[in-house]
Structures are given as C-alpha cells and as structure tokens.
Image (cartoon, grey):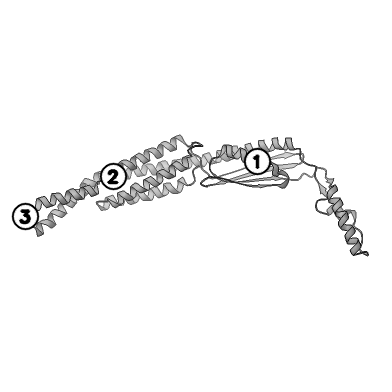
Amino acid sequence: MIHSMTGYAAASIETPHGALAIELRSVNSRFLDLQFRVAEELRAAEPLLREQIAARIQRGKIDCRLSRGTSGAQPQVLNAGALQQLRALAGQAARAFPDAAPLRVADILRWPGVLTEPALDAENTRALLEDLCRRALDDLCAARAREGARLAAVLRERAAEMRRHIAQVAPLVPEAVAAYRAKLADRLREVLEAGVEERIRAEIALFAARSDVDEEITRLTAHLDEVERVLAKGGARSSPAGKRLDFLAQELNREANTLASKAAGLKIADCALELKLLIEQIREQVQNIE
C-alpha cells in the first residue's frame, strides 16, 4: 500500500491526575525526522514515544506533542523544598527591610512551586502513554494511507496519459523521415545535376539514425511499467516506495529530454513537451509519498 507522508492525528485520555493528550503532525521529509514537545513531568516517556513511532513510520517529519492537563479534583500538596527556599529568602528580605510586613499564608501559597500535584505513578503512566500513542499512530497511519491512495490514483492517471502520448510518437517518426526525404530531394535537385539519389540516400540515412527514438520509447514504457508495479506493491522498510518512485521520475525525465532532443518534427516535439509536463507533475506528487 502507498502511504503519504502528510497526516494528522490526536488522542487523549482522562486520568485521576488530569488529561493526557498527544498530537501527531506529519509532513514530507527525505528521512524519518522526529521532533518532540513533551511536558516536563512526562519527559521520561520520550524514548517510548520515539520507539513506537519509528516502528510504524519509515519516512517523514513527525512533530509529536504530549501534554498533561490539570484536574481540579486532584488534591495538591506542599513542596517542602520550595517552602525551605522561600523561608530563606524571606529571612534575607526581613534583614534587609526590617520594617516590611511578614509574608501571609496566601502569599506563600501563591509562590511558584509551593503547591504541587502528587507525582505520577511511573508504571501506570507508561502503560497509559503506550496505549495513547498507539491509538494516535493508528489514526495517523490511516490518514497517511487514505492520502497515499489518492496520490497513487493521481500517479496512475498521469502514467496512463503518458502512455497515450508515447503511443502517438512511434508512428510519427516514419512520417517525419518521409517529409525530410521530400524536402531534401527538392533542395538537392535545385543545386545538383548528377549523383542526386546517392546524396539523398546518405542524408536520409543520417537523419533517420539521429531521429530514431525506439530506444527512448522502450525505456519510457519500461519505466512506466515499473511505476505501476511499485504503486501496486507499495513500499517496504528496506525500500520505501517514495524513494523508488522519485528515482523512476528522474529516469523518465531523462528519457523525455532525449526524446525532445531527437524530435524530428513538430508533432514529436509537442509530445515530448507533454511528457515532460506530466513527469514534472508526477515528481511533485512523489515527494509526498513515504
């Protein structure tokens, strides 16, 4: 199956300590690029998230955001360390300003870090995060698969259109050679009185050799066959479909350029130009495939 590198998913779960929420955003990238924005109290979960994502996704830039909401029902406790630090600071301030009013209880409770929530249970939190990340990855992979199916349909459509143009090229070559033969014969007869036919045959043979595009047509057809095979088979971890399709798009473009340089007539040149436009459209779409 073809997967896009573009997708979005989010999942959340309620816990006694507040809601845990994960958000995954995916865009195209040459390799797997993981970026994490994790709440400080959940920082220890980053290796778990990295392992789960890398096991499911091969390519793309993944932005993972993990947050924890507060719960109003969750009791708060005093932070002994913060209280001790505040007491020391208050003593210094009292010595510097002996006439200042002492701290009130409300002032103490508002001091940053004095009130905290109980520490999370590491084992239970890990199990919750593992399930949460799995759910988000399921949704993300499903979104990337749906987008990939749409991209594959577009690529098949472009490939079919290229085949139609290629099929038009082959019959045009003999027609172009015949037209050149007539044009060359007329010119040579104007300036030569003897040996005209031999000269014409030599010039025509040279022109036909330079205009032969059978090899380019064969390679273009073979590359299109491979494009359709990759689209049908999908990618693997050892050989991502996107990289293979990108290589094939480059090869298609190379053959189309050669075909254009050998164009023996306006119709062939037009076909080559249409092929190049279609190949460019394919290359743009391929950049989003995993």
Regarding mark 1 in the picture, which secondary structure is present there? helix
Residue underneath mark 3? 194
Amino acid type, callout 1? Pro
Mark-to-mark CA distance, 2 and 1: 56 Å
User: Mark 2: few, some, or many residues within 10 Å (few <14, many ≥20)?
Assistant: some
Mark-to-mark CA distance, 3 and 2: 38 Å
Residue 7, position in %: x, y? 56, 44
Q: Is residue 175 left or right of residue 40?
A: left
- Give the label on residue 47, or none: 1
Residue underneath mark 2? 168
Residue 216, position in %: x, y? 30, 44
Specify the quadrant of the image occupied by residue 226.
Answer: top left
Amino acid type, callout 3? Ala
User: Mark 1: few, some, or many residues within 10 Å (few <14, many ≥20)?
Assistant: few
Q: Which badge, 3 or 2, comes first in the chain's sequence? A: 2
Q: Is residue 209 left or right of residue 27?
A: left
User: Mark 3: few, some, or many residues within 10 Å (few <14, many ≥20)?
Assistant: few
Is residue 271 visible in the rendered image? The answer is no
- Work out whether 58 lies above or below 105: above
- Work out whether 97 lies above or below 212: below
Q: Which badge, 3 or 1, comes first in the chain's sequence? A: 1
- Work out whether 2 lies above or below 115: above
Residue 108, position in %: x, y? 87, 54
Q: Is residue 141 left or right of residue 279?
A: right
Amino acid type, callout 2? Gln
- Give the label on residue 86, or none: none
Q: Are marks 2 and 1 in contact (CB under 8 Å)?
A: no
- Pair 3/2: label in front: 3
Q: Is residue 142 left or right of residue 253?
A: right
> Of 54 and 62, which appears nearest the observer?
54
- Pair 2/1: label in front: 1
> Of 278 and 98, which appears nearest the observer?
98
